[in-house]
Amino acid sequence: MDGLLQKLLAGEDLLAELIGVLTALVLAVALALLLPREQKKLVRAPFGLLVLHVLSLALLPVAGAESSVGRVLAPLAMFFVLASIGRSGVLLGLDVLLGRKLGRPLPRIIRDIVQVVVFAGIGIVSLRQAGADPGSLLTTSAVLTAVLGLSLQETLGNVFAGLAVQMQRPFEVGDWIQFDSESKNIGRVVEINWRATKVVTLDELEIIVPNSALAKAPIRNYSKPTDATRRSVFLQVAYGTPPGRVREVLLGAVRESPGVLAAPTPTVVTNNFGESGVEYWVRYFITEFHRRDLIDSGVRDRIWYALRREGLSIPYPRRTLDMHQVTSESREVERQRESAAREAALRGVDFLAVLPAEDHRWLSDQTELRLYGAGETIVRQGDESREFYIIETGEVVVSVQRAGQADLEVARLGAGKFFGEMAFMTGEKRNANVRAAGDCRILVVGHDAAQQLFLRSPELAERISGVLAERQAELERHATVSPESRARELDEHKTQLLARIKKFFLLG
């Protein structure tokens, strides 16, 4: 009877052994078929463990089942077959099923932790098969456990920090990050394991950063939330060039530089007034972060050529003492040149064309040259300023404010045009806003200069009032008005203007 029972038990063990081997073999073959080509090498571990299992079983009869070696080989063979099944199951579950569902591979640290848990369970089962009690082993080795815990404290800290990094996902494999203040340590993440994160810099240096250090560091991720990253270039341009012109040249150069995105659009900011010149901050976006140095170099090259073509200089970082020999003759030549240009601008104004040549020359010496940048307000509606403006270069926008509505643009005036004549001659409030459309050079004639001019030639007031009256009547006339009516209105308007001019300039 006992012999029959032993045969039955041996048959059951053989059947369980066969089922275990077939299960491990089927899972390993399925893994070999389903894994991607670049991960085929992972199949070696399950097949290798299965081979070790078969070798252990083959040695068992040789050593003897009741011998000390046999008592070790039996649980060891069980461990190998279960380990093969466990390894194949983890790879199929995490890499094949879950990885394909998520559309990306799971982080290595998660796969490693799951694998360790599985192997730990298999080890406990194998110890029980060998007749050992894992619980008693842990209880009797409390001192050893404490020593191991203290010695592995930093390692465990890195493991938990790695898990925290994976849960928060501040970066992923393939992202470009910076984990300290050193720009040379900017690199691409190539691996995140249970202990550390591997980063490869542009110098092809591999940096191993402990996960515990990453968990405490402020991380800059240049690949999130999008792959567009803003870059900056700083430069100085001499003070003599208007900022509006410099920005126009810089933007034209940056937009055409290879690697610079069209959207978001590049921008230029007047950043600082330095010792050698005005500092400009050029800002643009790129997506090829690994080529950032080459793209920045190309932008600087384009800027240099663009400035050179426009005759704009980048000041040297040094102090230069320029000595010029100025004589009374050279000063007089320069003064006459500027005076002639201003006289020409004054002669282009219809109501000032009636002035004699000497008054033109005198008035040109009283004018003031002002520079305005794009968007700056020159005249504000409702102001009581007493100045007259002539556009030497550039363009201005004339607009009228409307209650509860946006400003209405009524005109654009270019070089040679003028504005503000009614407020200048009669003292009435400004009836429109005037803003610079771009960089402008404006000649300004003040109230005091006009008053002195009228005191020099009192008869000019009547002549100028006539010109202004004709000019305004031409703008306001209608086709239905008869010539006789227009003549009477012109005389009345001239008389009214003359009275207002005399009152405003105190001409009695």
Image: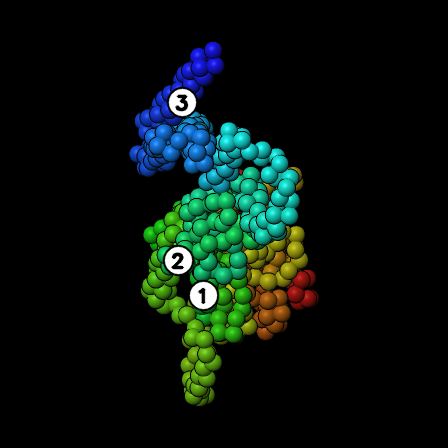
What residue is shown at x 44% (from left), y 56% (from top)?
207
State whether residue 73 is above or below residue 385: above
Q: Quadrant of the C terminus?
A: bottom right
Q: Residues within 10 Å of mark 1 (few under 14, many from 20)?
A: some
Circle 3 residue: 17
The first of marks 3 and 2 along the sequence is 3
Q: Nearer the viewer, residue 245 or 432?
A: 245
Query: Is there a contact, CB below 8 Å, between mark 2 and mark 1?
Result: no
- Say if residue 272 shows up in the picture: yes
Q: Secondary structure at mark 2?
A: loop
What residue is shown at x 51% (from left), y 64% (from top)?
371
- Image-quadrant location for residue 476: top right
Of badges 1 and 3, nearer the viewer stands: 3
Circle 1 residue: 235
What residue is shown at x 58% (from left), y 52% (from top)?
151
Residue 49 coordinates in the image, percent (x, y): 38, 34
State whether residue 8 is above or below residue 56: above
Tag 2: amino acid? Leu
Query: Is there a contact, CB below 8 Å, between mark 3 and mark 2?
Result: no
Q: Secondary structure at mark 1?
A: strand
The first of marks 1 and 3 along the sequence is 3
Residue 230 coordinates in the image, percent (x, y): 46, 51
Q: Is residue 194 left or right of residue 433?
A: left
Of badges 2 and 1, nearer the viewer stands: 2
Query: Is there a contact, CB below 8 Å, between mark 1 and mark 3?
Result: no
Residue 182 coordinates in the image, percent (x, y): 49, 61
Tag 3: amino acid? Glu
Circle 2 residue: 205
State whether residue 339 is above or below residue 3: below
The first of marks 2 and 1 along the sequence is 2
